[in-house]
Amino acid sequence: MPDHNSNPFNLQQYLDEKQKFINDALMDIICKHFTDSRLCNAMKYSLMASGKRLRPILCLAAAEAVSYILNPSVISAACAIEMIHTYSLIHDDLPAMDNDRMRRGQPTCHIQFDEPTAILAGDALLTFAFEILTLPETLSINQPHVIFQIINMLSKAIGCQGMIEGQMRDIINEGVTIGLEALKEMHALKTGALIETSIQVGAILGNATPDQIHHLTIYAQNIGLAFQVTDDILNIEGDPVSMGKDTGTDRTRLKSTFPDLMGIAQSKKYADELVNNALHALSFFGNKAIPLSVLATYIINRKR
Amino acid sequence: MPDHNSNPFNLQQYLDEKQKFINDALMDIICKHFTDSRLCNAMKYSLMASGKRLRPILCLAAAEAVSYILNPSVISAACAIEMIHTYSLIHDDLPAMDNDRMRRGQPTCHIQFDEPTAILAGDALLTFAFEILTLPETLSINQPHVIFQIINMLSKAIGCQGMIEGQMRDIINEGVTIGLEALKEMHALKTGALIETSIQVGAILGNATPDQIHHLTIYAQNIGLAFQVTDDILNIEGDPVSMGKDTGTDRTRLKSTFPDLMGIAQSKKYADELVNNALHALSFFGNKAIPLSVLATYIINRKR
């Protein structure tokens, strides 16, 4: 386990501040753009539940690692990313998919509302992410070609050769024993692609150099996989109350997991190894990457 | 009924040519970007079924009404629009929504594959539409700020205050008697918004003037509503074989329709009136709008 006891950086305070920052930005968007319709209420219900906001925080932290000022387009992008993540959770939780009843400490969208509302709320959050990225006020800050590139990267990362393909494989693989490489590839698509792109988007909007993007990408790929290994461990050892969702579900759904394939102890060691790789890639940035390095260790030490 | 017998324009030939053009462009994209995965196969299955291709044809026809050359970005946009339309059909057909078993003359996506695959194929087509709009080859033709504007318009038109809200109201209204204004508003969202935006997108990518866009918008709003009035009539009088889907479904689902509220004869008269308004708006363009004018009459005379 990487030792950060000597680091005066206060992780909890950082997370609290950044979560509040993201929540305020999301609420600001909701107030400006949502109506009081059933559809918007369902979107808001899932979006404003107490998520970790990990992806938008990584986006902001990547921008901060390469730049001194957070420009408004980074905040819009971070919010769009959280909307995309929330849409993916709503659809993954549907009865036809993982059929989950609890998420982020509250009933899932289709339980709280109903199934058609949840399908449409997911569709609408995905769609709204692209609207947010192309608001005229976003254009005024960045050159449009940068936003253009970001939309292309994001849609690739979450599309039929990214996140959605990962979710498809996750479903196809239920009840099937797959090898370690296939498991890694599935998670690289299902979870890794959006985490990686969140970090790259932050970096690009912070005007990162190609070299900086390269190192941040190595960091991202390692923490993306470490995140999923830890998720698998938490699904066995985690406390459903602090996680805000049911545990033990991988086993009941006969999903292949890292602990299945390599055992719990070896899985923890593997997660440590991945985080060490991530930290190594950050050495390129010096002190400016302290938040990213602490976030990497948080990813494997988290309780939810 | 507007009389176009004196018009030498051959509608069937025009539709055949344009449908082939769109189908070839879609197939080209599929060959370049899809894999042989279950997910991509489901996307292709629904996308390449024998749709009317009305929205992309309207997009191309609008571009042709204001410009002499079809640039590649109009074709990309037309394909993106058909992907969005197909995603909306796949999700609307789901068991939790309209629970339809036939569409475009073949089993619906969730019948042919299964429910999770259909949900994900819809998600992926929606996502892919934004990827197609931001391919580097699209950027090289148009200024990025134009594509930026188009993504913003499209995501608004199909979002939580556009198409998805229309679908939500359609579901909420099942079994409820609503008034004519509420019915018009619901259809303006559910069907009208995407038809209107298809035409505006074609116009903008054809470098239309604000005046041209204004007249095309009036045309679009009228044919959008005429399309839905005709759909309601076809749901009663249409032949399921030539329509490629079941009829009589509005009645079994207790949906309010134009024939319910104003009778069949009056509904037909209303559709004629709307098309006349649309044709009036086209007089601004002279001969260049012949395809659009013939398409308007096709919309109310179609058999599917």
Image (cartoon, coloured by chain):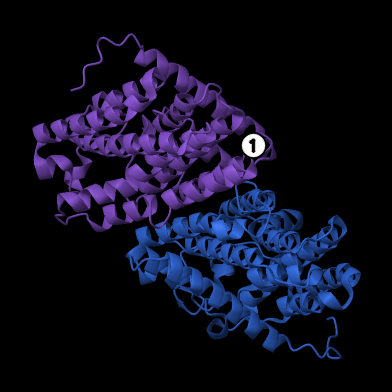
Chain colours: A blue, B purple
Percent position of residue B84, x then y = 47, 42
The residue indicated by pointer 1 is B138
Chain of the residue displaying label 1: B
Number of callouts in the render?
A: 1
| Residue B276 appears anywhere in the view | yes
Percent position of residue B59, x then y = 45, 32
Seen in the picture, residue B78 relative to A225 is either above or below; the reply is: above
Which quarter of the image is occupied by the C terminus of chain A? bottom right
Which quarter of the image is occupied by the N terminus of chain A? bottom right
Residue at 72%, 86% (x, y): give it.
A11
Does residue A30 appear left or right of residue A192 in this picture?
left
Does residue A4 appear left or right of residue A72 in this picture?
right
Residue at 22%, 41% (x, y): give it.
B249
Seen in the picture, residue A296 relative to B92 is either above or below; the reply is: below
Q: Quadrant of residue A140?
A: bottom right
- Amino acid of disc 1: Thr
Which of B74 and B56 lies nearest the eye of the viewer?
B74
Percent position of residue A207, x then y = 77, 61
Percent position of residue B198, x then y = 44, 37
Residue at 85%, 81% (x, y): give it.
A2
Seen in the picture, residue A152 relative to B215 is either above or below; the reply is: below
**Label 1 SS:** helix
Seen in the picture, residue A12 relative to B251 is either above or below; the reply is: below
| Residue B124 appears anywhere in the view | no
Does residue B257 appear left or right of residue A255 in this picture?
left
Which of B52 and A297 lies nearest the eye of the viewer?
B52
Q: Which class describes the residues within 10 Å of circle 1: few (<14), some (14-19), or many (20+)?
A: many
